Amino acid sequence: MWREHVKVHVEADADPPAYRSAVVYVTLGEPLEGVGILLRLREGVAVTGCWPRWPDRMGEREALWLATLYPRRFEEGIVYSFGVRLDLQGAPPVVLGNLRWGLRGRAIILEAVREPRVRALVGPLRPGFKVLSSLGRLEVVGEPLARYIAIEGRGVALELEAPGQSVVSGYLEFEPEDGEMPFEVEVFGLVNPVFERTMIVRLWDLHLE
């Protein structure tokens, strides 16, 4: 039995701090009527674009979409979904304790602390990179010619070398606090929804050459 699930995914840049986009996605086990997504925007945050359509009702700081549910078939059965994707403007008050992302000589340095956890992803990396030290649960993922280092924990640290590479990118992923969100989310027509919130903060590119 599918539970009523609401997924909220927000993306932002670290430098300069700025919201990029957000997705609010509702999944239900049955085609309920009267489902709607209401967003109450924080002061200083604006919606500059949205998909698949603009809100059915929009005020100065609120936007309301009346859901048009569509079926999706899985082995476990049929679920019904509706979602909106937003392009955003505004600066997030994201607090990342002891964030460090830069170079020490030819070595790439990353440090971040976040309760209860933070996940960092660095890459893509060409073959030949070398992890010099790390703190947190580390995993190497991706294709042979484009590897990523994923590291996760309450506090994470990473030092690596990537010879022959000119640019290295990275981002942090964590569950945001209420005050870090660009908006409050209310979903009408659901009985007991489970909310899942994720924020991705994209770090600035490091130029090695």
Image: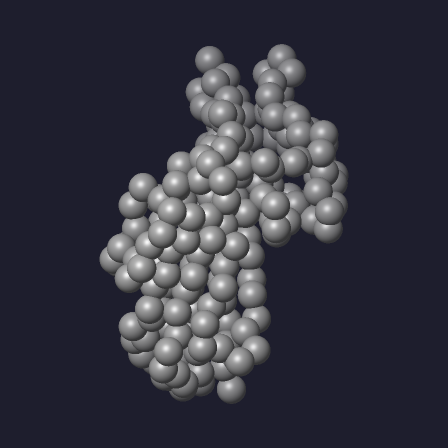
175 sits left or right of 64 in the view = right
For image coordinates 27% across by 55% down, the residue present is 54
Quadrant of res 66: bottom left
80 sits left or right of 126 in the view = left
For image coordinates 51% across by 30% down, the residue present is 17
For this orientation, the residue located farthest to the front is 60
146 sits left or right of 53 in the view = right
Q: Say which of 185 and 121 sits in front.
A: 185
For image coordinates 51% across by 86% down, the residue present is 1
For image coordinates 56% across by 65% down, the residue present is 195
Residue 15: percent from left, percent from top: 51, 26
Quadrant of res 108: top right
Above or below 178: residue 28 = below
Q: Is residue 50 visible?
A: yes
Q: Say which of 116 and 88 sits in front.
A: 88
Q: Is residue 72 visible?
A: no
**Which colour scheme appears in the figure?**
one colour
Above or below 108: residue 182 = below
Residue 96: percent from left, percent from top: 66, 35
Residue 12: percent from left, percent from top: 48, 38
Above or below 202: residue 208 = above
Q: Say which of 71 and 145 sits in front.
A: 71
183 sits left or right of 73 in the view = right
Task: Tell how many labels.
Answer: 0
Above or below 105: residue 21 = below
